[in-house]
Image: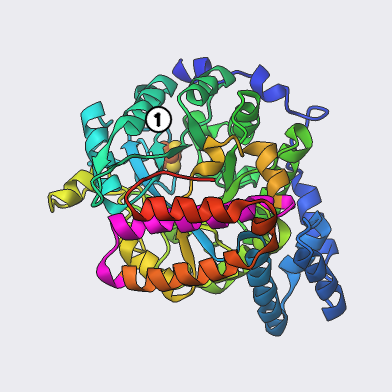
Amino acid sequence: SWIDQVIKQDQIDKYLINGKDFINENEIHNKLNMNKDCSKEKVRAILDKSLAVERLSFDETATLLNVTDEDMWEEMYEVAAEVKRRVYDNRIVFFAPLYCGNLCVNSCRYCGFRKENAGEERKVLTAEEIRRETDYILSQGHKRVIVVYGEHPKTDAKYIAESMKTVYDVKKKSRSGKNSYIRRINVNAAPMSIEDLKMLKEVGIGTYQVFQETYHKDTYKSAHPKGLKANYRWRLYSLHRAMDAGIDDVAIGALFGLYDWRFEVMGLLYHADDLEKQFGIGPHTISFPRLTPASGSELSIASKYLVNNKDFKKLVTVLRLAVPYTGLIITARENPEVRDEVVKVGCTQLDASTKIGIGAYDKAAHNEKEDKQQFTIGDNRTLDQVVNKLAEMGKITSFCTAGYRCGRTGDKIMNLLETGTEGKFCKLNAVLTFREYLDDYATEETKKIGEELIKKEFEEINNMEFYKNNKLLSVINDYYKRISEGERDLYV
Ligand code: SF4
């Protein structure tokens, strides 16, 4: 069968250590049970480590997860916000998801695209339709997309590579009269073989994202009863294979609400740790979608592990404290209030103007009704509205994609992040790309707040020794002037 052809057992076995997975459920449960001493002294000592921007151990993370004192949590929120400021300053990166196909051979019990879901419109976009979707995304001001596919022979690696080429090829004139184009494509797709992943590397993949959904094996089994996705290990090692294929930007994630949230946070850490152990590079980002109602998916209502808003903020906080250098993504599944809260304690990437139906951007462009979706969207704000709101909060939107195009990826970016150097480049590129956005796409109102923010950024930049010492001040001033005069895509 197709399933037997896809799964390559040797590309699972080679990553096992003594025949075992890096997820040891007993060990995770033990860590959570053994680290129940959450005295103020102990927790504060751990927080000091986070403040020194060091990664936490499994025991330390388990301790934080066990904190019950709400006052202590308030302290933890503050420290998480400070850690985020130290590593990422006030920058938020934006992307738009582009759903290219909703045909799927799997039966995930929480998903609207599951095979058994009758009455859904099932479709794989043609190249022309992908062009139209990209056109709309560009018209909003985006520079970065994540292309999303179900698991199906019609959306195999060849199709994915072709659709990526199509997206990269689309050009659209902005207000400045200059062509705008997608500068980075991340991919959310099913687990693949090393050979297939190499194909995606060749066409310029940014980050490859596969969520394990749940690290708890019995829960995994019951949520994924049939299809390719029923193979826990094929999925668990998909990002190991990506590393072997030369894709060193990978993204992990769990679907919160399937099993105990504390266990899943630990699972994510063990995953990050194993990637680091085996390849020297941790994940670029972590995602933590929560179960939301989807048509034909009984689990999203019935699960006893659904995570409330309060615990959600806690889990994001612990992740920020535990892995300071890893980006945290919060998607438009969540409503604006929840997003604002978790941005404060640690998220670094958001989507906006989001449509998750197949061909939905084009429909939006023509005011057509949307079809059913994989899950429900909680934040329907446009990119301009979110950029505006963040600017009010003193946060600058960055459309920077320079790191990837300058070869600052994988272990190189990790080193640069750890020494604080990458952040310095990011600050400059944020200002440059924000300038482009304000001139090309922003409403008058957003432009006004944005100008103030840029002024403040320049005050800081002009006073920082790093820029003076590295002769970057004249470069940024020159680039900024040229962009203000209409040039585009200049980066450091
Ligand atoms: Fe298919 Fe993904 Fe939905 Fe599962 S979650 S049914 S793999 S589209």
The verdict on residue 433 being magenta is: yes
**Mark 1 is on which residue type?**
Val
Which colour assignment does the render follow?
rainbow
**Mark 1: C-beta under 8 Å from nearest atom of ligand 1:** yes
In the image, taking residue 392 as reference, residue 412 lies left or right, namely right
| Residue at x 54% of width, y 38% of height | 404
Q: Residue at x 76, y 64 (%)?
A: 50
Spot occupied by residue 275 in the image (x, y as percentages of width and height): 71, 38
What is the magenta range?
A: 418-445
On screen, 39 above or below 5?
below
* Image x and y of residue 251, in percent: 57, 43
Quadrant in which residue 473 is drawn? bottom right
129 or 184: nearer the viewer: 184
Q: Residue furthest bottom?
A: 71
Tell me the quadrant of ligand 1.
top left
Report which quarter residue 79 is drawn in.
bottom right
Q: Please indicate whether residue 348 sits to the left or right of residue 281 in the image.
A: left
Q: Position of residue 1 (x, y in %)?
A: 46, 15
The residue nearer to you, when weighing 433 against 411, is: 433
Q: Secondary structure at mark 1?
A: loop
Label 1 sits on residue: 105
Residue lying at 36% horizontally and 23% vertically, measured from the top left = 162
Mark 1 neighbour density, 10 Å: few (under 14) some (14–19) many (20 or more): some
